[in-house]
Amino acid sequence: MKIGFHLSISKGFEETLAEAKRLRCEAVQIFVKNPRSWGRKELTDEELAAFARLSSALPVYAHLSYLPNLAKIDEDGRNLDGLLHEAALCEKLGIKYLVAHPGSRPDRGLGMEMTARAVNIVHGSHDITVLIENTSGQGNVIGSGAGELARIYEGVEDKERVMFCIDTAHLFETGCDIRKKAAWEGFLGEMEKGPGLGRIGLFHLNDSRTGAGTHADRHWHIGRGEIGLTFFRSLLKDKRFAHLAGIMETPKMGNMDKENMKVMRSLLPPLVPRSSS
């Protein structure tokens, strides 16, 4: 598995590449615009050239910003407009994968229907793949388990194109105690019966600051949270997912990115050659 981080682009893509090299990343995830604003972004030729240097060095995944709610594209036009704007930015940059949370809605059934519709619209207008991320199930947030992910998948028209991003902290916080092999394999079994394990296209490798079943979205540093190291060691050794990337979204605190990478690399199987970048 290729290991990396979600990194900031606030200082430009050249700085993102420098930070990726400093941390010895083998893949990175970014926001393609300000994640806390509805404002649109125009890419300059200089930014496109700098991004080309970044993407030629390692795989780049995009994450949808915080504001668009896919489960409510029928209630507020900004939700779909924002999603499509970021999809267009990804396409212009050459990013193939956009990670998106399914969104939040009290009527969960209608929310899942709208999320699938949003994915269909993106796939119908842009040459990118949406990676639907599982959630912690906080409040009215949908997509907290394999069952809801499968229901969204059922509504997606191009089933060979849509994929899923599995966030370890979110899954643990739903009450699936992935520290126990039976719970983890049970989740994978549900995924296999629904979309299929081949539809998993990315992992978010996050420990959890809170316990199983808290439904709190609280990422924490690898091995210092409630999940611990055993699960991550097992996941990194799992040949079913060896071809995928794992992105850490751990809190940006002091030198903890470097420490988290050190810990994660210590869990990798021996004799696997790693990038020296």
Image: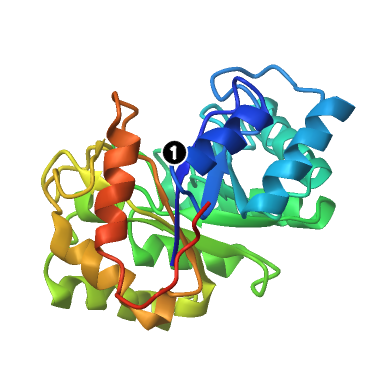
- Foreground residue among 48 and 271: 271
Image height of 247 relative to 203, above or below: above
Q: Which residue is mark 1?
A: 105
Question: From the image, which quarter does the N terminus lie in?
Answer: bottom left
Residue 20 position, x and y percent, is 52, 41
- Foreground residue among 172 and 150: 172
Residue 80 position, x and y percent, is 69, 36
Tell me which residue sits at (31%, 58%) in the image. 265
Tell me which residue sits at (24%, 51%) in the image. 263
Residue 268 in view (yes/no) = yes
Q: Amino acid at mark 1?
A: Arg
Tell me which residue sits at (74%, 50%) in the image. 122
- Name the side, left or right, on which 137 lies relative to 44: left
Q: Which class describes the residues within 10 Å of circle 1: few (<14), some (14-19), or many (20+)?
A: some
Instruction: Count the numbered circles shown.
Output: 1
Tell me which residue sits at (62%, 53%) in the image. 58
Residue 185 position, x and y percent, is 24, 78
- Foreground residue among 276 and 178: 276
Image height of 44 relative to 268, above or below: above
- Name the side, left or right, on which 58 lies relative to 26: right
Rendered image quadrant of residue 41 = top right
- Foreground residue among 110 and 171: 171
Residue 234 position, x and y percent, is 23, 72
- Element under label 1? loop
Colour setting: rainbow
Residue 196 in view (yes/no) = no
Outermost residue, right direction?
45
